[in-house]
Image (cartoon, helix red, strand yellow):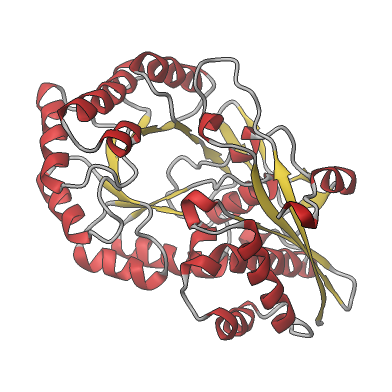
């Protein structure tokens, strides 16, 4: 079997309008992603998604498409069933771990896994090693700008069945710098969420690298925890993603878990995190590390070192969120999965895939990812060449 065609479809996704205060999508303008369709000489077709965002991966739609075109040329006539060799070929194009190419590499990776699943008549999670579970508790991100709206949003999602909330507490510190006023405001939002929900709801406080100093992080959180201990609270990536020593200091000083997100860029980076003792848990984004093939290597390191794993949306279309759930299925103890990013947008060009009900995401045993393209929606959402 050989790869004979890789088609690229850049699409525009329009955010939904929320009817309750500030929402997850308030910070997102229309986002773009690239849908891939790989066709083989036997007629088997695999679908993938290269999702990115300029503010997060420093990558434009044009650069994403450039990487995908270069990979496509290199992979022509290659065996789509040999994932390891496909990544070796992509290494020759871009090098092994440059972060700017990883979302494009991940898109190819997804489509190849989809092909393997269809050829073998098995879901992707079986190709990855098998499933511990196929239904998952869910997490959502909350970006509300006031304590009152943060509390209201927290209660809303708990009523809907969500078991995890990521509380964004970095807007003021990014805007105003780290000072008494900005920290008091961010702390008030966190406290509002903590007090609004029962302590069996996972609360991940996320300053998005903006709190700068490990001693400041410890001082602020000690002030909270000295008044009342919150067993459901964790702190996520408060410092620069390269500051593993600083995160180790926080982990040693506090009695709550430390999560690293942006620091997790490769299996080699994960090994350094473990060696430094810098994290109790990580956020694993398969598109940031180059696909499911490399994400599984990171997961193996984590499970060997007893480091927890959370999976995060990009946000994706329904395909990307379905792929995240297939990866989650292979984890022994997955934390609540963030797989509702596709619901942030008005439409998706896919039929099938994961289902969401009462705060839980589920996948089935259909071959590959179990999704098909809706050609009409794909064409309606497609971005013309002159737009990028």
Question: Between residues 161 and 99, which one lies in front from this camera angle?
Answer: 99
Question: In the rendered image, which quarter is residue 243 located in?
Answer: bottom left
Q: Which image quadrant: the N terminus?
A: bottom right
Taking 201 as reference, is 74 above or below it?
Answer: below
Residue 366 seen in the current view: no
The residue at 36%/19% (across/down) is: 146
The residue at 46%/74% (across/down) is: 97
Residue 262 in percent (x, y) is at 38, 55
Q: Answer with left or right where residue 313 lies relative to residue 253.
A: right
The residue at 13%/40% (across/down) is: 216
Question: In the rendered image, which quarter is residue 233 located in?
Answer: top left
Residue 188 in percent (x, y) is at 26, 21
Residue 184 in percent (x, y) is at 20, 24
Question: In the rendered image, which quarter is residue 272 located in?
Answer: bottom left
Residue 126 seen in the current view: yes
Residue 102 in percent (x, y) is at 54, 66
Q: Which image quadrant: the C terminus?
A: bottom right
Question: Between residues 12 and 207, which one lies in front from this camera angle?
Answer: 12
The residue at 72%/76% (across/down) is: 72
């Amino acid at each position: 079997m050989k790869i004979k065609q890789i088609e690229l479809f850049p699409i525009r996704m329009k955010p939904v309008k929320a009817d309750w205060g500030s929402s997850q999508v308030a910070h997102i303008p229309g986002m773009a992603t690239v849908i891939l369709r790989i066709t083989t000489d036997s007629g088997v077709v695999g679908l993938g998604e290269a999702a990115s965002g300029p503010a997060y991966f420093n990558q434009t739609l044009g650069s994403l498409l450039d990487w995908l075109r270069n990979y496509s040329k290199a992979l022509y006539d290659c065996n789509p069933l040999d994932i390891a060799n496909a990544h070796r070929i992509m290494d020759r194009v871009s090098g092994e771990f440059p972060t700017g190419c990883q979302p494009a590499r991940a898109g190819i990776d997804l489509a190849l896994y989809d092909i393997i699943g269809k050829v073998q008549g098995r879901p992707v999670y079986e190709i990855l090693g098998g499933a511990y579970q196929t239904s998952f508790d869910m997490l959502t991100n909350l970006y509300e700008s006031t304590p009152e709206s943060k509390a209201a949003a927290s209660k809303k999602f708990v009523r809907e069945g969500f078991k995890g909330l990521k509380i964004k507490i970095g807007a003021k510190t990014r805007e105003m710098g780290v000072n008494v006023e900005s920290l008091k405001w961010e702390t008030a939002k966190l406290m509002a969420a903590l007090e609004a929900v029962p302590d069996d709801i996972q609360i991940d406080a996320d300053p998005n690298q903006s709190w700068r100093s490990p001693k400041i992080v410890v001082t602020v959180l000690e002030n909270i925890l000295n008044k009342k201990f919150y067993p459901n609270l964790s702190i996520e990536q408060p410092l620069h993603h390269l500051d593993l020593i600083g995160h180790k200091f926080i982990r040693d000083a506090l009695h709550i878990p430390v999560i690293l997100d942006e620091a997790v860029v490769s299996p080699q980076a994960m090994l350094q995190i473990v060696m430094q003792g810098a994290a109790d848990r990580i956020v694993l984004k398969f598109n940031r590390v180059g696909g499911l093939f490399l994400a599984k290597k990171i997961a193996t390191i984590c499970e060997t070192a007893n480091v927890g794993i959370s999976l995060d949306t990009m946000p994706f279309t329904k395909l990307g969120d379905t792929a995240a759930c297939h990866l989650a299925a292979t984890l022994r103890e997955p934390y609540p999965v963030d797989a509702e990013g596709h619901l942030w947008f008005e439409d998706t060009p896919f039929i099938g895939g994961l289902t969401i009900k009462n705060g839980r995401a589920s996948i089935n045993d259909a071959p590959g990812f179990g999704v098909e393209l809706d050609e009409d929606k794909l064409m309606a959402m497609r971005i013309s060449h002159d737009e990028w």
